Amino acid sequence: MIRKYKFMEKKNKGKLKIFFGYSAGVGKTYAMLEAAQLLKKQQVDVVVGYYEKHQRPETEKLLKGLEIIPNKKIEYKNNLYEEFDIDKAIARKPAIILVDELAHTNINGSRNNKRYLDILELLDLGIDVYTTMNVQHLESVNDIVTNKTLSNVRETVPDYIFDNADEVELVDIDPKDLLERLKSGKIYNKERITTALENFFTIKNLNILREMSLRQSADKILKFENKNIESNEEVVVLITPSPSSQKNIREASRMAELKHTTFTAIYVEKEISDKPNEQMKNHMDLVEKLGGKLMILYGDDVLSIVVNYIKLHKIKTIVLGATWSKFRSRAFETKLMTLLPDNDFYIVPYNQKKITKRKIFNIKFDWLSTLKLVLAVGILMPIYYFLSNDYYNVLCVLFYFVSLLIVSYKSNNWIYIFIAAFSGSLGYILLGQNIELVWVKVMIFFVMLIMGLFYGWFVYKYSRQINKSNKNNKALLAMNILTNNLLSCKNIDEKSKVIVDVFNSYFNRSIYLFFGLENKKNIFKLTNDKDNIFQDEKEQVIMEWVRKNNKNAGNGTQTLMSSLARYEPIKSKKNETLVLGISCENKRLSYHELVLLKMLIPILELSL
């Protein structure tokens, strides 16, 4: 059964048609190729850009007579892979191109990380695209699919791709008929049939997914019919580096859709660190995929910062995860609800089955620091021995604590403090003391070890606090200087100069502020005398893509990753989109730089 839904018209862009189903084998690729054959009979310039080779005879027959663009072969880890060749597709530029498997992740070395990004490029060039997709690959329902079917789907597509599709063709089949097709070998080969029937292809899972595909198709019709309905009410979701925040973000996205509005994810950064936080980066990517906005705030008092933001922006609906606490009165959400009694709260339950114990001994050895410590101990022992000959035990103890001070202040892990204290105490009783009684030696050893550990730990924490303060002060200083300088500007030209100067100073990278192709307002500042990468034609095209699509791209993102810079869209108060480019020619932005960037962008949007 096939149902077709046509949606909005778009000027100067290609049209996207999705053949939508709930499982492999329902007939999405077959329906797509069947439509292509019909178009060819009507003299339409249609080509096959990529199709998944499932070795299904009925589907293979529909390829006859159609022009097929050869796949691009990419070698990765001594294996050869075939991917969609977007360069050949652009050079061919047909009226309509078929690209199977919208949710596919491209192999390393491809132009884009995801196939849907390839398709977006084709649409921007005015090429119509036909593609296929299953409901479980929609980002917003990923957690629901995992919970209900116990199947982890890793490849996902942002909801805005599905929501903005011009046409959706629902390809449907009864689950019982689908199972018969599977058993007869029409979906997978014989070796995979038994495994499929025992795992994913159960009647329960198929019924759940079928219901979801029907509901998503119906929801898309409702969204189209209510596209002119807008709400000023914004949904806010509070996130942390915890993996459970992924579920909270998806819940906020679904709630925002129901309210015909957008959602903002708020993260309060207590300590700006150079250490990469992969979980937070995943959260940032998910928010962008679901079309939300990320707001990073800074401070130690998370509760007061969140309350002030909610009151200032007059937020009504708040989504947050349940805090695990033995005493519910001490839980964060309880305190928040007490301070905001007029707000609507949606508490996402915490799944205790997925709780993982925190690693207490999370040791990562730095071999250079270890080598330095071994050399220090090697020097320390002869000095102990030399001083002990003259009975300068006080100097031995003094030298022990001075050495421990240096090691503790310079170390990046507590394990080096323990090694230094242990080896220093052992060296002292073996070489620095002429004591015959064993129990006295043991007592002195443990006394010095305990004193050394307490002393070293205090110095270690103090040095980390100093580093934390320096980094945090730098971030606050950048925010204050940017805000104050922008307030004193009279026009856009002065503001542009301030922006590139401040960003160049604090990121120590070449900066570019892009207003549009051939726009005389474009301004840049370089950190050195090297060629300006921003003047490259390829980089200019990427910046124009970011400006038109209002989405980030470039180095460190999932879009146009081969770029030598990272580009972030800035939405001005006049509803114009500018692009901020930050050079990544030498190295990618660190987590600390990424957090600082996310903090500064809202200031730019308010001032421009």
Image (cartoon, helix red, strand yellow):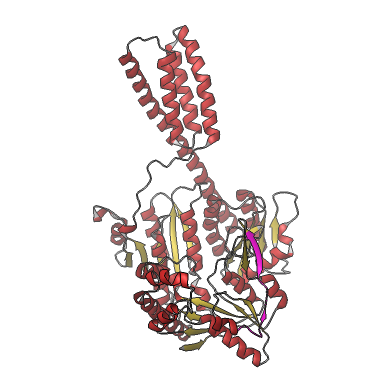
Where's residue 549, x and y in %?
A: 59, 71
* Residue 547 placement, left or right of 198: right
Task: Looking at the picture, tell me which residue is in the foreground, 258 or 307.
Answer: 258
Residue 473 in percent (x, y) is at 51, 45
Q: Is residue 481 above or below residue 364?
A: below
Residue 12 placement (x, y as % from top left)? 65, 81
Q: Position of residue 159 (x, y in %)?
A: 49, 73
- Report if residue 69 lies within the magenta region: yes
Which residue, as the protein is rendered here, is positioned at the far top? 390
Quarter of the picture containing the C terminus is bottom right
Image quarter of residue 453 = top left
Is residue 319 covered in magenta? no
Is residue 427 in view from this perspective? Answer: yes
- Residue in the picture at 64% in, 65% down: 111
Indicate whether 585 appears above or below 346.
Answer: above
Query: Toward which corner of the image does residue 242 lie, by quadrant?
Result: bottom left
Name of the residue lying farthest toward the front: 190
Determine whether 581 is above or below 590 in the image. below
Looking at the image, residue 185 sits to the left or right of residue 64; the answer is: left
The magenta stretch spans which residues?
62-75
Residue plotted at (53% across, 53% down): 596
